[in-house]
Amino acid sequence: MLNVHSFESLGTYDGPGIRLVVFLQGCAFKCLYCANPDTITFKGGTPTPLEEVMRKARNQRPFFGKIGGVTISGGEPLWQAAELKKLFRN
């Protein structure tokens, strides 16, 4: 289960090609110029099963082309590294 802040479909700024961007909730760094300050707090977010993230990615796969894909952003994704390892094994 990932604590997800939001999803962005058809993203073009967070990696090559067209991407599904998964913004995770929670970050302890508190960088001065944070690009996603609404994802800093560990409270909030939506507990999302890994299967739901995979379902969204599979549904959008036709739009990815040869260089698109999935980007995990944040918050800080490494706070949820154990769950992300499970996600990327699929």
Image: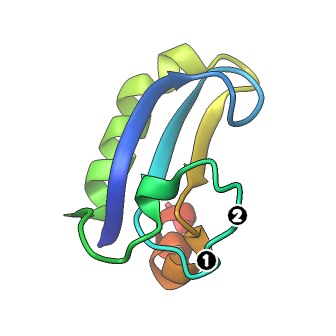
From mark 2 to mark 1, how far is it between C-alphas?
A: 19 Å
Element marked by disc 1: helix
Question: What percent of the width, then of the height, locates residue 66?
Answer: 73, 21
Mark 1 is surrounded, within 10 Å at the Cα level, by few (under 14), some (14 to 19) or many (20 or more) other residues, namely some
User: Residue 57 vs residue 31: left or right?
Assistant: left
Front one among 28 and 77: 28
Q: Which mark is residue 32?
A: 2
Question: What percent of the width, then of the height, locates residue 25?
Answer: 40, 65
Q: At 63% across and 48% down in the image, what residue appears? A: 35
Element marked by disc 2: loop
- Upstream in the sequence, badge 2 or badge 1? 2
Front one among 74 and 37: 37
User: Residue 68 vs residue 90: left or right?
Assistant: right
Point out the frontmost of discs 2 and 1. 2
**Which residue is identified by label 1?**
78
> Could you say which quadrant of the image residue 55 lies in?
top left
Q: At 77% across and 28% down in the image, what residue appears? A: 16
Above or below: residue 28 compared with residue 36: below
Q: At 44% across and 72% down in the image, what residue appears? A: 26
| Amino acid under disc 2 | Leu
User: Residue 57 vs residue 17: left or right?
Assistant: left
